[in-house]
Image (spheres, rainbow, N blue to C red):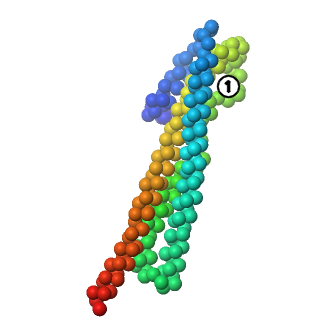
Amino acid sequence: MTAIAETDPEVRAAVHLIETFEPRGGVDYSWAVREARGLHATVWEKFDLLDAKAARVVNYLGSGTGLLALASTGAAGAGTIDPLVAAASLVPFGFGVAATVYAVKAHRTERVCLPSSVAHTIDQCDHYEGDAIRAEAKMLGYTQLATALLTRAAWEKARRIDMATLLFAIAVGTLAVPVLVSVAMKCLSWSTK
């Protein structure tokens, strides 16, 4: 946690809040608690949406890349496509595989930090001798920490999805490579006749 806190100001602020915040008696912190829980719920929702998007990208890319590989290999094996053209199809295939790898990494299970454990919540209630408002307020730092760590995980997931999308676009663009090789081979065969 210390290494993350050194590089992430949101995590550092949450750790600081946990270490230094002492709720005062007679102060109603309920709105702050609602705000913190709402923010955490919003980030969690975004995380889930990104995860669902990553799953769709994995399915889409996996199918497309597999079909490209099967078509090229099958055509080359049947002699209907020149082996050089089939080899040129490895370029888009490679980008397709790389895109799929990034999408799979985006979809993998992430360890996320939950706001608090039941045992810790009970400890806070005991510490504040049943003063639920103060006990709940003390948990604000833990909710902020969980939200900051979840935000980091969501950003990483989004970065991987973006990279998968970029690599897929490159794969589609490089589909021209086998076509260009085929055209060049035809031009060369005509010029040698």
Residue 47 placement (x, y as % from top left):
56, 41
Q: Confirm whether residue 131 shows in the render.
A: yes
Residue 4 placement (x, y as % from top left):
49, 35
Q: Confirm whether residue 146 shows in the render.
A: no
Frontmost residue, 141 versus 1: 141
Frontmost residue, 183 versus 17: 183
The residue that label 1 is drawn on is 120
Task: Say few, some or many: other residues with alpha carbon within 10 Å of mark 1 (under 14 / 14 to 19 / 20 or more).
Answer: few
The number of callouts visible is: 1
Q: Which residue shows up at 31% across the image and 87% down it?
A: 190
Quarter of the rendering containing residue 39: top right
Q: Which residue shows up at 48% across the image and 84% down it?
A: 80
Q: Which residue shows up at 45% across the image and 81% down it?
A: 81
Residue found at the far bottom of this picture = 193
Quarter of the rendering containing residue 149: top right
**Looking at the image, residue 95 lies above or below residue 5:** below
Q: Quadrant of the C terminus?
A: bottom left
Q: Which residue shows up at 58% across the image and 25% down it?
A: 36
Residue found at the far top of this picture = 26
**Looking at the image, residue 172 lies above or below residue 84:** above
**Looking at the image, residue 160 lies above or below residue 91:** above
Residue found at the far left of this picture = 191
Q: Secondary structure at mark 1?
A: helix
**Looking at the image, residue 78 lies above or below residue 65:** below
| Amino acid found under the numbered disc labelled 1 | His
Residue 93 placement (x, y as % from top left):
47, 67
